[in-house]
Amino acid sequence: YGAGQIMIVAGAWAWLTRLFDADRVWAVVALIGARGMGMYLWHIPLVGLAAGTAIATGWSVPALSATWWLVHIAVVIVVVPLAWLIAGLAARPERRLLRLHLPWIRPGLGCLIGGAAVVNLSVTGFATWSGRGAIGLPSSALVNLALVWLAFVMVNPGSAREQHAHTEQ
């Protein structure tokens, strides 16, 4: 899905640069891209919350109807800015963690934690409050999200420190 989106933007790039001033295009790319991974991680529980709200209230519309499309567009309009905002707020504890320079922050351990979290959530997903995961461990949307975030920080401590240094300049 992500690769498809990148290919669409790459295919439309010449048209986009003619339509928009190149500096303006890069400003938008930089603004969103600076929090890209955080936005990716945080959009999942936000969309889950929207879907859970629809399920809890019994609200349903026919698939691909005009109302269905309007609701999906509205969700995107709400979720993208919220995910960007939450990703920025979540970056603060990440920066504090990176300043500690703890010896246990190693890529190998981060991969193990992240891999276990991804395998575990493959059964329950990010929208489940509790349940049994794929490897039999208790699974929770918030715990899975925290573990994936921790694994990302552990695997990429240098790049995150460089981003932090760059944002302070």
Image (cartoon, grey):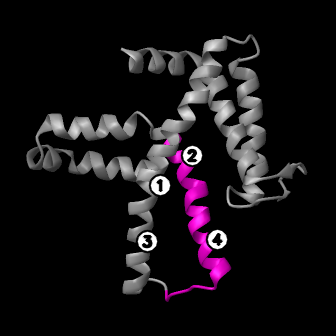
Q: CA distance from mark 2 to mark 1?
A: 15 Å
Q: Which residue is mark 1?
A: 1
Q: Secondary structure at mark 2?
A: helix
| Amino acid tagged 4 | Gly
Q: Which residue is mark 4?
A: 52
Q: Which residue is mark 3?
A: 72
Image depth: mark 1 or mark 3 in front: 3
| Amino acid tagged 3 | His
Label 2: few (<14), some or many (≥20) within 10 Å? some
> Residue 148's mark?
none
In the depicted view, which residue is nearer to us: 88 or 102?
88
The quarter of the image holding the C terminus is: top left
Q: Which residue is mark 2?
A: 41
Q: CA distance from mark 3 to mark 2?
A: 19 Å
Dot 2 or dot 4, earlier in sequence: 2
| Amino acid tagged 2 | Leu
Magenta-highlighted residues? 38-62
